[in-house]
Image (cartoon, helix red, strand yellow):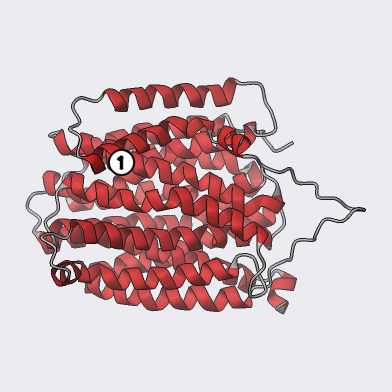
Amino acid sequence: MLAMQRDRTPAFYLLISLPATAMGFALSVQISVLSWMLATRYGLKIDEIGLVWAAGPLAGIVGQVLVGGLSDRIWVWGGRRRVFIIGGGAMAALAMLLLPQIGAIAHGLGLPGVFGVAITVALALDLAVNVGFNPTRALIADVTHEGAERTRAYSWMQVVSGSFGVGAYAVGAIFGNDVLIYVAVALVMAFGVVPSLLIAEPRPEAPTAASPATSRSLSLPTIAWTLSPIWALLVYDLYGLSARVLGLAETGYAAEALCAAATLGLVVHAFIARPDGDSAFRRTVAASALCWLGVQPIFVYMVSFLQQRMPMLDAAALGQTTSIAFLALNAVAAVAPIGLGAVARRFGPIPVHVAAVALMAAGCFGVWLFAQSPWHLYVLMAVCGIGWGSIVSLPFAIMSERVDATQMGLFMGLFNLSVVLPQLVTSLGIGRFVAVVDDKGLVFALSGGFLALSALLWFFTRGARVP
């Protein structure tokens, strides 16, 4: 064990933040580049872009839980998480290298269009991020103590990861997205491999007759019950994907209305039902799912919003404006956890998170109502950055204190389903809505509404802990 890890120095908090930074940087590149490249370079339509984005969350449904559960049980190369972080980083680097080559690959294969290749590359990139991201977050919980130390570690993670995310959007805005891709490949490999080899992971003690295992075994029915608030999202995702694959004509919005009504009922049930051993986790899943239903449309449909709201932007200006908007969002998100973490140690993470998410909701409504020029958008996205900085840091500290520490990888994977299932709904359901409405700014109105509901749910998770 390095001295910095034993003494919990600032260098240690920096070191354990770098693997998550590598995966976050790959995700930043995907957000900044994918929609822009598909729309401007390959001419895909709005609903086709949404379906390409759906490929990644589809991989996450299986990948997050499977990798999380496996990483709790294996010991390879001197750690539980190490092999997944290194493998995920290598896969992400390769997938990013393929992004600018989608057209060439389709041509080389003799395909009439790029749609299938785009889905395959997006799937590979998101699968890589899913393989690596979950273990990077679980690793932080593994090597820190519950409470203020862990909150501090996740705040450091977001400051470091967010700072490099800002760098990603800055590189894209200044030098172009093609340069950004090659910078990202080098950074993801360096930050994914080297730090994970230096961090000493604690080896779980094997249960003995004198000291039996205290963690409970999670059966499939138990796991399903912990995810009850997002059952309707899963059913809708399966329906939506099946309809797209089979080429079924979708008329009306009955499926979306049923999904919304069922989700509302399941979420309410999670908060009013008699508390049990899983109620704290279920409520956290419910609050997180509503939050990501608000966040993901911003990333997927920003380009569509700009094309309709600011038609004077040509392809180059559109890419630059998108990069600067996400730069503003992530610049604030990078430094926000410094203040948020300090306030959270004083008042608790949940009240701080509620306020930050509510502020992001207000920022989204502001974009819908007032953003008529790039500078309006940049300022309001900076406001949203406070909430974004909280969303990618504090919930993991909150969740990690409500579950069995010996099954952290599995619960981290289950918790991340509250991220990937809303992402699929964004691509399959919200994409249909965006394609037909005249005012693409309604994307931000919808996001603001979901975020406001999420803030309310987070407020009512106070005091719920694993028994």
Classify residue 51 as left or right of residue 294.
Answer: left
**In this orientation, which residue lies closer to the viewer: 59 or 460?**
59
Visible residue check, residue 427: yes
Q: Residue at x 66, y 21 (%)?
A: 274
Residue visible at 64% across and 65% down?
A: 80
Task: Tell me if mark 1 has few (under 14), some (14-19) or many (20+) residues whose alpha carbon lies within 10 angstroms of its own.
Answer: some
Choose between 402 and 219: the one closer to the eye: 219
Residue that sits furthest to the right in the current view:
210
Label 1 is placed on what type of residue?
Leu
**Disc 1 on helix, strand or loop?**
helix
Q: Residue beneath label 1, please?
A: 241
Q: Residue at x 51, y 34 (%)?
A: 286
Split into 4 quadrants, where in the image is the C terminus?
A: top right
- For this view, does 157 lie left or right of residue 54? right
Query: In the picture provided, is 273 more to the left or to the right than 309?
Result: right
Residue 280: quarter of image: top right
Q: In this rendering, is residue 239 above or below 156?
A: above
Name the one closer to the observer, 301 or 95. 95
Quarter of the picture containing the N terminus is bottom right
Q: Dividing the picture into quarters, in which one does residue 279 lie? A: top right
Name the spot of residue 32 as percent of width and height, x first.
28, 60
Compared with 450, 391 (above or below) is: below
Residue at the spot 75% in from the left edge and 61% down from the top edge: 204
Count numbered badges in the picture: 1
Horizontal side of 1 relative to 31 (left or right) equals right
User: Residue 235, percent across and down?
Assistant: 40, 33
Percent of width and height locating residue 106: 17, 66
